[in-house]
Amino acid sequence: MSFDRLISKIIEMKNPTVVGLDPKLEYVPNFLQKRYLDDDGWTLKAAAKAIFAFNQAIIDEIHDIVPAIKPQAAYYEMYGHYGIKALEKTIRYAKLNGMFVITDGKRNDIGATMEAYTNAHLGAVKIGDSEIEPFAADALTVNGYLGTDGIAPLLKVCKERDKGIYVLVKTSNPSSGELQDKLMGDTPLYAVMGDMCEKWGADTIGKYGYSAVGAVVGATYPEQLTELRKRLPHTMFLVPGYGAQGGGAEGLKGGFDENGLGAIVNSSRAVMCAYQKEGCDEREFAKAARREVIRMRDDITSYINLK
Amino acid sequence: MSFDRLISKIIEMKNPTVVGLDPKLEYVPNFLQKRYLDDDGWTLKAAAKAIFAFNQAIIDEIHDIVPAIKPQAAYYEMYGHYGIKALEKTIRYAKLNGMFVITDGKRNDIGATMEAYTNAHLGAVKIGDSEIEPFAADALTVNGYLGTDGIAPLLKVCKERDKGIYVLVKTSNPSSGELQDKLMGDTPLYAVMGDMCEKWGADTIGKYGYSAVGAVVGATYPEQLTELRKRLPHTMFLVPGYGAQGGGAEGLKGGFDENGLGAIVNSSRAVMCAYQKEGCDEREFAKAARREVIRMRDDITSYINLK
């Protein structure tokens, strides 16, 4: 009912990073695309199979180094229900390999509907006497624009099933300031949203001092990251925007507490496409991903004080 | 590239309403649950089949009266990829019956990822030389918290493929005011978001005066609905909260312009569960849904000036 499970893994692996599995088909090496698409035709089904094979190979190579993956729902929805099946399989495969899974869905709705999203992604669905977990992720990203009653169903399941959420606070994109930086009184919207995260998480604080309600804060805004770390002492950060989006490791420092905890940094494209950047044989894509996650871990941990 | 297609249907049918297809399994009559679940077991797959059969029967009975359906993505995600397949089939079946389809997904993300959502729900995905439309809805609800670059990919596809979006502005839930009513300077957040909708839609205004960028404004807040109708002259409203959530027809008046246009009112549970409220034979669920959509149409149009 907090992020203790994830934080324990981070400490054990000395690695506060997460790999975003956002497998656009163009990221998948040609030989793997061909393996599925030549057999089955250029269909959504074949694309989804290629993507799962790609994810599986990367998980095989990184699961002993990286504590978590973050599949981005959009890149699975792109391939219709076949893509969603690949998402289910990716989550299951990562968990079988001991990884913590954060589904990046940025879901949001009114209470009754949010209950459906919660049961889908973190909880279970009742069908007659059976209880089935459709996706069974460990955490979900959500958008708090609708206020408390859109978050309440998530909190219930977080407590019952030891899950977590990350609420969008200060996003990594260039136009995030249009609304999020606007002042409400003398407080920017992102800080108002951050304060709500502290409130929502207040009765779920775990042994490391962090609650089950985290916040998404972009690496591309290091000042706000530092400011929010101080303002939100019980809120763990999921930090996108390192690497491909332009955020450097030194700027991330401010997102961590004095024990090197309190944040997990995401990298997606730089890991998935490491083989392209390296220019190595594309059949080595998973080994290249491994080299990149090691590089990233060493880069980030060189700036923080993780024991 | 505006909401002209939808508005033309509304005028033709003299009916500014949309039926929310949010088929929780408990809404599906027992005889229909049994038909699928007794044969296939109490599985996600069987539940998804029952839901599609339920939707299909309702679409058969309402498509000559109601211009649009609004399937809520959460109630399909609840049943995993089987549920998503039921969503695809529901959208296709409604379109074959001439209906306009608004997928209620409240999706949101940074630009590159929003492009994936856009292609999934409104556009097409390229796989080799093929272009496939995974969901092919006519419109999508979205959340604007990330600002302009999370909306830009949607606008592109709206223009290219004659689609529309509805951005969350003032939602129907009890806690929507926690953030949305807070003042930024002297303007509440919901109005700031509304102003952005006017800006985003500015070059997509159609023959009825409305752009491709609509706004979600809850029937449960009639004052804000009236205020926003005046403030946002080119923004069409999708209005949830009529009926089951407590918003009455008289309070909706303010959401319409002097021609009875500018808004479409949603009802979900009251239509899907009309057979329960009526207490009729459950095998008549679709006929009861038909009676309810006629009642709703007559109720709402008695307050507005739709010619």
Image (tube, coloured by chain):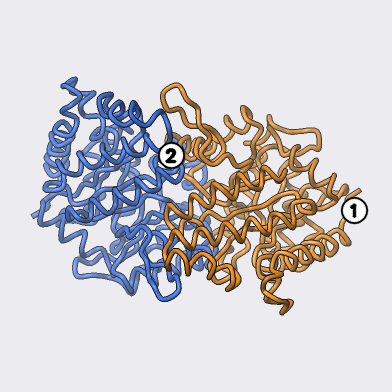
Chain colours: A orange, B blue
The residue under label 1 is A305
The subunit carrying tag 1 is A
Which residue is depicted at the point 45% across and 65% down?
A: B151
Give x and y (percent) for residue B30: 28, 24
Give x and y (percent) for residue B145: 51, 56
Q: Is residue A167 visible?
A: no
Q: Toward which corner of the image does residue B281 lie, by quadrant?
A: top left
Relative placement, left or right, of B171 versus B234 is right
Amino acid identity at mark 2:
Tyr
Q: Is residue A285 depicted above or below B249 in this figure? A: below
Identify the residue at the far bottom of this view: A279
Front one among A238 and B249: A238
Give x and y (percent) for residue B127: 44, 70
- What number is the disc on residue B79? 2
The subunit carrying tag 2 is B
Q: Toward which corner of the image does residue B276 lie, by quadrant?
A: top left
The residues bearing labels 1 and 2 have C-alpha atoms spaced at a distance of: 43 Å
Helix, strand or loop for disc 2? loop
Q: Are marks 1 and 2 in contact (CB under 8 Å)?
A: no
Q: Is residue A15 depicted above or below A214 in this figure? A: below
